[in-house]
Image: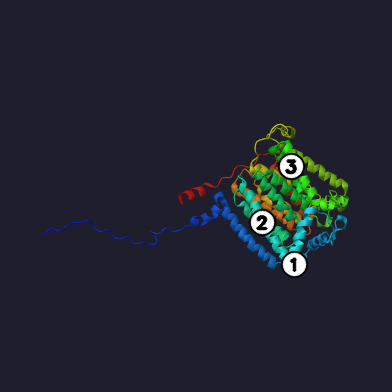
Amino acid sequence: MVKKVGHPRKKRERHTPSNEKVLGIKDVLIVPARLLLDPAYFNILAMLLLLGESILNLLVINKVSYTEIDWIAYMQEVKGFIEGERDYSQLRGDTGPLVYPAGFVYIYSALYYLTNKGTNIRGAQYLFGLLYISTQALVFTIYKQSKKIPPYTIVLLCISKRLHSIYVLRCFNDPVAMFFIYACILAMIYKRWTLSSVLYSLGISIKMNGLLFFPAFGIILWKSLGAYKAIGHLFLMAAIQIGLGYPFVSTYPESYLSRAFDFNRVFDYQWTVNWRMIDEKYFVSTEFAKLLLAGHVFVLLLYINFIWCKKEGSMMDAFLRGFQTVGPSLTADEIITMMFTSNLIGITFARSLHYQFYSWYYHTIPYLLWQCKWLTTGRVNFLLHMRIFVLATIEACWLTFPSTDKSSWTLLACHVIVLVGLYGTDIGETYHPPRSIIASQTAS
């Protein structure tokens, strides 16, 4: 008999550990790497950070003791308004007279009712925790519009100990004003010019520090809308201020204007974070104030003429062109850089920075560090370390209490380093995720 020859049966492959795909370190690390480096994952990173920040703020509110500084005084000031007083000179608290515009009165009157006449401080802390998260979400959205920074810069916005304290352990009015300023910047990015003007005016109505943004804000309106529409927006902002202040202007105008918009106010030397190296007698002098104002104007003119109006040729060319034609649309990064830089110039030359003023510009520092000319060339790791070092040094200066000559000199040096780095260069290079991230994404 002839045996049939058939096809040999295939032996079943045995699955051994060597046949299975083993996840290596690179596979494990690629997920956080994408979150931190790939703009496509920006929203996921932002949501995770906001969730973490929410938990952290709850822990801070419930585990760290609240420190009373200005909250009771705020409540005392608005109580007089609620009871019918319209003379600003008569609205006072334990820390002195009311010195903020009418928007502050309305905001804190609402908080007065929401917190049982200001006695429910824990409730106020929760409201300011919500304000903190809302502000972070706003700033994250601003950063997302940029084409010049890596996604992980928003992580740096969440690491300030002093900033958390200002919001949820102090309940200052500075963060309230800054919420409207950041909302204004976001509206500008989306070319919602009327909305941006309304938001900007509302921010100033709470605290006048928003005026530090005005040089850039005015130039952006002038270049984007032309002279006549820009002037119209200025009238709109003025009308908002008049409308908000009407209950006071219509009764005691001189009292309101002299108190709410007091440009000659001198802050206490003992609380200053900057210029501690200056003798107190000279610190409060008119000569020092004039010197700082001259420096402020000089640096602003340098930026306006040689950086912000560089495309038009000069500041005068940009001014005249505004009456003739509307210029090309500004990019998101041009708007962000101009607004943030204008504010930093004002802060650098401010006579006194109190600890709550840190909220005026902390959110802008990471972005500005990525635009500095002296940090745009060289080894990537070194550049990252230097940026983080400058940010950490600024934070350390603001954590030093009371401030010292050394901390004030160091803070000034950091501000100057950033301003010099921003001067004489175009907006930073467009950010691209590392090739390894792109390759791993394609492979998966």
Element carrying mark 3: helix
Which numbered circle lies on residue 233? 3
Q: Position of residue 67 (x, y in %)?
A: 76, 65
Rendered position, 312 above or below 76 = above
Residue 53 location in percent, x, y?
64, 60
Quarter where residue 218 is shown: top right
14 vs 408: above or below: below
Is 249 left or right of 216, judged from the image as shown? right
Q: Amino acid at mark 1?
A: Asn
The CA distance from mark 2 to mark 3 is 27 Å
Q: Which mark is residue 107?
A: none
SS label for mark 2: helix
Q: Nearer the viewer, mark 1 or mark 3?
A: 3
Q: What residue is shown at x 62% (from left), y 47% (from top)? A: 145
* Residue sitting nearer the eye, 251 or 432: 251
The quarter of the picture where the N terminus appears is: bottom left
Q: Give the residue at mark 2.
A: 134
Query: What residue type is disc 2 on?
Result: Ser
Of residues 401 and 163, the one drawn nearer to the viewer in this rendering? 163
